[in-house]
Amino acid sequence: SCGNHTPTADQSAAPRPDLLASHVDSTVDPGEDFFDFANGAWIKANPIPGTESAWTIGHLINEQLYTIRRSINEKAAVAQAPAGNDQQKIGDFWTTAMDSVKADRLDTTPLDQLMERIDGIKTTADAFTVAGELNRAGADVLFAFYVSQDSKQSDVMAAQLWQSGLGLPDRDYYFNCEAGVAKNRAAYPGHIARMLQFLGQDSATATKAGAAVMAFETVLAKNSRTLEAQRDPYTNYNKMAVEGPLHATAPDMDWRALVNTYGLAKCDTVIVGQPEFLTAMDALVKRT
């Protein structure tokens, strides 16, 4: 009967606080400044830390995730899990990454093999082969190649190619005349030169190389789509067969071999974000 009805757990639980309402600054007129009205209380309760240039709820979530991941890694490092166990692999990875004494002792020697491959480039084909090796090592050289959901068929994972190869944050950093951006752009070749000196190059050689890298990347940037253009999901979706249209975008690149090196021998199509970038990239590498 109604008189004997026992409330369910959801019915008896205290109502949850309205998080959005808690962020509202009611002292602000929403007609004058809706952003401050809607977010003012959160902003006041979460000032920008002295170590940061900006702070949003996204930063806060990332910090929480970093804390969780660090805890997982630290626990795995002392767990003494059986060899081959996932926890043992995580622990070994963390211990290796945190061994700063060993890192200082090794210096740049772990990069020697890759640097030798770069120094050995003689032809355009060599350049693209090494670019693929560097991409697999985690550096988006010339282009970015990865596997993610097909945006037109979300239950399918697809190989993807995207414009990349820029050391500055995005293509506009190479052309924007705003003072802060121009300052960063002017300092960039010197930064490259210092990195090359750490690898053993003399000052004059490194300085010349820094300028050459800047010139190379500026051409890549000129042929890259703007951030606004990259937001169009239709123009940035170009599914191409590996043995045909993809090859035509950059004929000096052996795309079939590249895809195979990722263990994707059965992959016959790739989603290309910016086909014209690949064509310009091919021409730039050829004449360089």
Image (tube, rainbow, N blue to C red):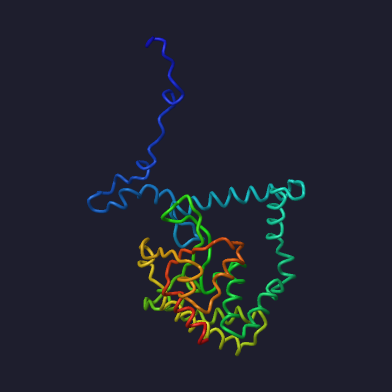
Residue 244: x %, y % from top left? 48, 71
Whether residue 5 is situated above or below residue 278 in the rendered picture: above
Whether residue 145 is situated above or below residue 113 in the rendered picture: above
Which residue is drawn at the image coordinates 62% and 71% (left, top)?
Answer: 133
Which residue is drawn at the image coordinates 45% and 66% (left, top)?
Answer: 240
Q: Quadrant of the N terminus?
A: top left
Q: Residue furthest left?
A: 31
Q: How many marks?
A: 0
Left or right of 274, for residue 199: right
Along the viewing direction, whichever of 245 and 118 lies nearer the viewer: 245
Along the viewing direction, whichever of 49 and 120 lies nearer the viewer: 120
* Residue 258 quadrant: bottom right
Whether residue 82 is situated above or below residue 166 in the rendered picture: above
Residue 95: x %, y % from top left? 71, 56
Left or right of 94, for residue 127: left
Along the viewing direction, whichever of 110 and 137 lies nearer the viewer: 137
Residue 34: x %, y % from top left? 28, 51
Which residue is drawn at the image coordinates 49% and 50% (left, top)?
Answer: 61
Along the viewing direction, whichever of 93 and 113 lies nearer the viewer: 113
Which residue is drawn at the image coordinates 56% and 83% (left, top)?
Answer: 124
Q: Residue furthest front?
A: 243
Residue 108: x %, y % from top left? 69, 74
